[in-house]
Amino acid sequence: MTDAVGSIDTPDAQDELQKKPRKGGKRAKKGPLKRLAIFYRQVVAELRKVVWPTRNQLTSYTTVVIVFVAVMIALVTVIDYGLNHAAKYVFG
């Protein structure tokens, strides 16, 4: 029986499975303060990539969230009130 084309049972795949992963690596050679500094620089670099909303967008997003929360509060209140009265009717 022959293997299908692109099968994962190729000799190369078997060699990769048998290789042991490296221990330590580049991170193990640096001290905790150096790693903290690298982390801080990476965070700042990622924050520079963020597209921040304008003031108008932020105002509209905030308004939408507040209106949505108010509608959900009203909906839950009405359902709670209705279930409360239904429970009083059923159980006396």
Image (tube, rainbow, N blue to C red):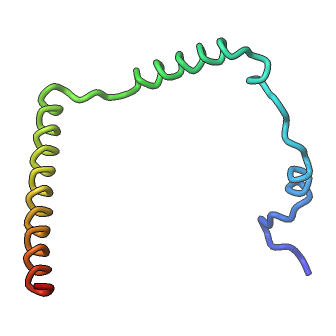
Q: Is residue 51 left or right of residue 14?
A: left
Residue found at x 14% / y 80%: 87
Which of these two is toward me, 26 or 82? 82
Q: Position of residue 56 (x, y in %)?
A: 12, 29
Q: Residue furthest bottom?
A: 90
Q: Position of residue 12 (x, y in %)?
A: 88, 54
Residue found at x 60% / y 17%: 36
Q: Is residue 36 left or right of residue 18?
A: left
Residue found at x 12% / y 44%: 66
Which of these two is toward me, 9 or 88? 88
Residue found at x 10% / y 62%: 77
Q: Is residue 52 left or right of residue 64?
A: right
Q: Position of residue 15 (x, y in %)?
A: 91, 52
Which of these two is toward me, 77 or 43? 77
Image quadrant in which the C terminus is located: bottom left
Where residue 49 sits, quadrant-wise, is top left
